[in-house]
Amino acid sequence: MSVENIIQYISNFVYLYPLLMSFVWMVGGLIFYWRLERSKSPDPNLNRYPLFSILVPCHNEEKHIEKTVHQLLRADYPDFEIILIDDGSTDNTRAIIKELTKRHERVRAVYFEDNQGKATALNAGVIAAKAEFLLTMDADALLETTALKWIAWHFVNHPRVGAVTGNPRVLNRTSLLAKIQVGEYSTIIGLIKRTQRILGKVLTVSGVVAAFRKQALVSVGVWDTDMVTEDIDLTWKLEKQFWDIRYEPRCVCWILVPETIRGLWRQRFRWSQGGIEVLKKHKDIWTSWRQRRLWPVYLEYLASVLWAYAFWAFVLLWMLDLVWSSSLYVVSPIPPRWTGSILAFTCVVQFLVSIYVDRRYDQKMFKYLFWVIWYPFAYWAISSLTAVAATPKGLMKKKGVKAIWKSPDRGLA
């Protein structure tokens, strides 16, 4: 095979793979909406309201934790407790938590002297929890009041449901990066989760808001403390034991996203490294026919990593071709007129589809239509570069090294 043919194959993969996946996500999202979501019912029908333990791990959250707890206390649900886990905070978080436990009967707390990592904090929360059903939340997130009812519906009516992942929505929308992420969380993440649910297996629950059956957690050994993205790893552990993982878009949770390049880089690097660690750890699914429904999820994630390498290889070849005027005739990585037009048009169509299925959760989404067209040109570069940079680290990370956390970028406000 000639060099020119290889370059042409890389070029086709770089342009056609995201185009193909966009159509897969749109079709899957619409099927999910039509079958499982289009009901206008404001509340699910529940025969009983089981106790929920809401676990909120905290590390240096003095600016957000009080607001998060007050929003949780407004939940339209009769029976729940809130367990705050302070993981070695060095700011005023611990004092605020102690005050919250004094003022509110529903609030209890667990304290660590040193930073042990989110997974360790959550495992301590499981031990302290009184309930059979657990909701885990980030300490800077705001949960909609009806969310617990929609999660409870899955657990009460379907005993094989091991986890339910919620619907994160972007709260801070002042910067360009934040506005683009408004589109990303609905256009990309929301449609992907809907499609994966229709296909039967979900890549990951959302670390910012997810609920679990305690029996399911214990059956797989709860969270592993050496995984950078403990949420992806736990999802795979549950699905390998044939627990059902569901996506519930009516479990809305408002989140703060990074608004600086550095903050976004750190977040996406961690996601990419964690994804590679999970592929490495769970490669044994290929030795078992019973795990065949996880194969497409594995292959799709692997293809996305290969796409990142192909994209940057293509960029490098193009730059070399420009500098040395070689005979490779590498096409510019900036999409040609017709390809760029198709990608931009598909991106807009995908956003319109997401508006259609998500409009009840975010009435202001349409005003961000303009900003989402920048996703293929600017955001792909950041996301793909973090995948390239993080893959070697994920492959070489030693097993058993505890993953601790740092306070993320919570926006410019």
Image (cartoon, grey):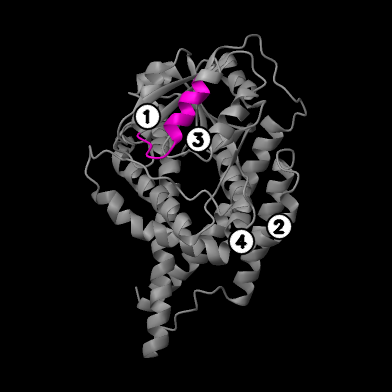
What amino acid is found at the position of numbered circle 2 in the picture? Leu
**Measured Cα–Cα span from mark 3 to mark 1:** 12 Å
Mark 4 or 2: the one toward you: 4
Q: Which mark is residue 176?
A: 4
The x, y position of residue 347, in whole percent, is 64, 59
* Distance CA(mark 3)–CA(mark 2): 29 Å
Residue 286, position as x, y percentages in the image: 32, 38
Horizontal and vertical percent for residue 308?
42, 61
> Which class describes the residues within 10 Å of circle 2: few (<14), some (14-19), or many (20+)?
some
Question: Between marks 2 and 1, how big is the CA–CA gap?
Answer: 39 Å
Tags 4 and 3 in contact by the CB under 8 Å rule? Answer: no
Amino acid type of disc 1? Ala
Q: Nearer the viewer, residue 345 or 364?
A: 364
Estimate the spatial distance between the alpha carbons at disc 4 and disc 3, rounded to whole Å: 24 Å
- Label 2, on which residue? 369
Q: In the drawing, does residue 360 fall left or right of residue 128?
A: right
Q: At x 51% / y 19%, what residue is drawn?
A: 102
Question: Identity of the amino acid at label 3?
Answer: Ala
Which badge, 4 or 3, comes first in the chain's sequence? 3
Helix, strand or loop at mark 3: loop
Name the disc covering residue 121, or none: 1
Q: Dot 3: few (<14), some (14–19), or many (≥20) neighbours within 10 Å?
A: many
Horizontally, is 402 left or right of 325 in the view? left
Mark 3 = which residue? 139
